[in-house]
Amino acid sequence: MLLGLCLATLFTSCSGMESKRIRQLLHEKGFGSRAQGVGTYENYVAGGDGVVFFIEPSLYLQPGFEQLALLTQPQSVSLDGTIFVPYVGPVPVLGLTQREVKLLVEEQVQVFFNVEMQLQARIINAGKAYYVFGESIAKGRLPFLKADLTLLEAVASVGTSPLANLGRVRVVRPDAQNPLIIEANIREMILTGNTTYNIRLQDNDIVYIPPTFFGTMTRFVEKLLSPVAVISQTLFSAASLRMSYNFLVDPEASLFFPFAF
């Protein structure tokens, strides 16, 4: 009895500790990434983006300023969210807008050289994307290739399967506190030209294209029969290997009993 109580206490404490560690990993707002923002309205540095600077050549051609030319070469943001600034070292820029990156790097370099300088920062988008799931040809994480990407453009670019229900396409704007779900009738948009729900997508938006009723039944049957298909494929593969072996051992006999085991 005492041993059971001790084990129960130990299990409860371990479970409580694990739950506490999990709660520490949860976030309270936004998508969950370290960099937050709306890149289509005010560009910001996200993980996977690059940064390049424009500097007057007359500045880095001066003696002692030569390494500033490295800033004119595009560089990807490091895993810790920093970029390398000559004479300064790693500078954290993750989540900053172009203007904030410009002011930060200018300040860092001016402190080092004790001179006033002007430079321009440019963010090279590579880390911003949206997500597509459901009855689409292209699925998963897709890069944001234009600033004003609309829902109709996104659906047309990824393509849809014959089982897609274009009348109930969903756009999910994820957030830990207030996620937003918008349902749009793409079929009506195509037939009537009413673009009321042709919303502009933002980075990290999720586009879900559901199946029709018959599409749902078809997918259910596919999942139901998928183990049978795997078993059948395995058996046919084994039979094919056996037939090849029989042909190598006795070519004449295998002509009459090709599937003999």
Image: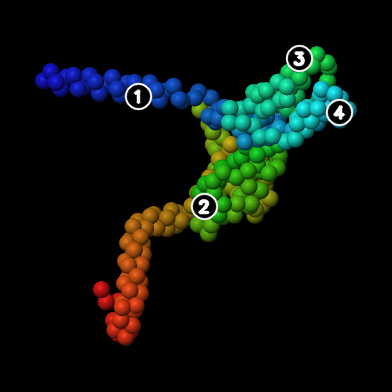
As helix, strand or loop, the secondary structure at mark 3 comes to helix
Mark earlier in primary sequence (3, 4): 4
Check disc 3 and report the residue beneath it. 111
Residue closest to the eye, 130 or 76: 76
Amino acid carrying mark 3 in the image: Val
Residue at 50% across, 57% down: 163
**How far apart in space, not on screen, are marks 4 and 2 (Cα)?**
56 Å
Element type at mark 4: loop
Name the residue that disc number 2 marks: 135
Label 3 to label 4, Cα distance in Å? 19 Å
Where residue 214 sits, quadrant-wise, is bottom left
Disc 2 or 3, which lies upstream in sequence?
3
Q: In the picture provided, is 234 more to the left or to the right than 161?
A: left
Q: Are marks 1 and 2 in contact (CB under 8 Å)?
A: no
Q: Nearer the viewer, mark 1 or mark 3?
A: 3
Looking at the image, is mark 2 or mark 3 nearer the viewer? 3
Contact between labelled residues 4 and 3, with CB atoms less than 8 Å apart: no
Q: Is residue 21 above or below residue 200?
A: above
